[in-house]
Amino acid sequence: MPLIHEKIVALLLQRKLKKRDLANALGISPQTATDICKGRSAITLPHLRNLVAYFGVRADFWIDDQQLLPESADRVGNNQSDACHRSGLAQLADLDGLLQRLRSFLADHKDAFTARNPGLSSDDLRVLGLLEITKDSVGRNCDSAEGA
């Protein structure tokens, strides 16, 4: 019967992540992350929410005492919100500022970037600021793309 802290350790090992990564994802100190992994510190509801977002597995996986690692049915739906949480982008205070700086850098290095990433869609290029916005793309946002 695996406990939550054992599941965390198993997922960290499986994904080749460190306790420091867990600490960043949960917004806790590295020592608290170590204590959680050793079963010495309790997992709070906010921790559980962040575990769901970070590892991309449903909340009921964490309380299921029959399995150590998630199965495909345990995965959270693959939408942009989940991806933002797992990547840490949802925690950034100035995401717009970061995107502007990235877009500026990519504009300066457009040829090299597009040559290295030939599979980018027109939506990818538009978001990165490498393709002009057309009438078709005006009004589209992350929420409308989730249903696609």
Image: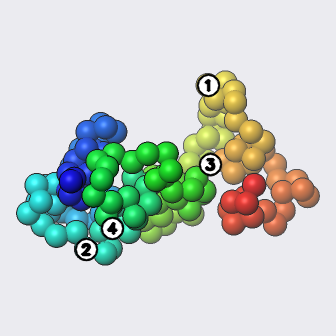
In what element is the residue under mark 2? loop
Amino acid type at mark 4: Leu
Distance (Cα) linking label 3 and label 4: 34 Å
Query: Looking at the picture, how far across and down is residue 69, in whole percent?
Result: 33, 45
Q: Earlier in the sequence, mark 1 or mark 2?
A: 2
Q: Which residue is mark 4?
A: 48
- If you read the primary sequence from the N terminus, does the residue marked by circle 3 or circle 4 appear first? 4
Task: Tell me the distance, in whole angstroms, between the alpha carbons under discs 4 and 1.
Answer: 38 Å
Cα separation, mark 1 vs mark 2, equals 43 Å
The amino acid type of the residue labelled 1 equals Arg
Residue at (8, 63) in percent of width and height: 40
Label 4 vs label 1, nearer the camera: 4
Alpha carbons under labels 1 and 3: distance apart = 16 Å
Please tell me whether mark 1 sits on a helix, a strand or a loop.
Answer: helix
- Find disc 1 in the rendering and name its residue: 116
Residue at x 32%, y 73% (from the top left corner): 46
**Gap in angstroms between the C-alphas marked 2 and 4:** 6 Å
The spot of residue 9 in percent (x, y) is 22, 47
